Image: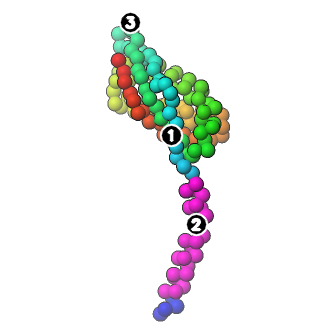
Amino acid sequence: MLKPVLHSLLLTLSLLVASLPAYAQEEQKEIVYYGFDPDIVTNYISGNKRSLGYIRLTIELMLEDKSFLPAVEHHEPLILDIIYGTVSKQSEDKIKSLTGREEIRLDILEQLQAAMKKETGDAMIRDLLFTKYFYQ
């Protein structure tokens, strides 16, 4: 009776020990945030087409690992170009709605991940956060 329980316990223990190296590798990655200074300010297409509205954003990039910081700093001009280009092409309705804001965020995120994948071989950016979002 004791022998099957002991065998089961040893099997469980050996599986746990075997999974430790994989767990330790995942733990080494440290998520960091990268922000832009100054805030991003650009125009967007206004509804009356006779004037431009403007939007001010503070964006934080959530990076998969702090080892990606030098690459993101190096590619900051490309990242900012994608952000400015995407936001400035948006309509007033999209800028001012909550669903539109989320669509813009996801669109920028997808473009940044694709650009970083092309430039560095790794998407690097896990998420993009709007920490400030003002429009007029």
Instruction: Please tell me whether mark 1 sits on a helix, a strand or a loop.
Output: strand
Q: Amino acid at mark 2?
A: Leu
Question: Quadrant of residue 91 in the image?
Answer: top left
Q: Is residue 79 above or below residue 2?
A: above
* Image depth: mark 2 or mark 1 in front: 1
Instruction: Please tell me whether mark 3 sits on a helix, a strand or a loop.
Output: loop
Identify the residue at image location x=42%, y=23%.
56
The residue that mark 1 highlights is 33
Q: Tell me if I can see residue 106 in this picture.
A: no
Identify the residue at image location x=34%, y=30%.
98
Q: Measure the alpha-carbon separation of dots 2 and 3.
A: 63 Å
Q: Position of residue 17 (x, y in %)?
A: 58, 71
Q: What's drawn in magenta, residue-wise?
A: 5-28
Question: Quadrant of residue 66 in the image?
Answer: top right
Q: Residues within 10 Å of mark 1 (few under 14, many from 20)?
A: some
Q: Earlier in the sequence, mark 2 or mark 3?
A: 2
Q: Is residue 99 above or below residue 45?
A: below
The residue that mark 3 highlights is 50
Residue 12 colored magenta?
Answer: yes
The residue that mark 2 highlights is 20
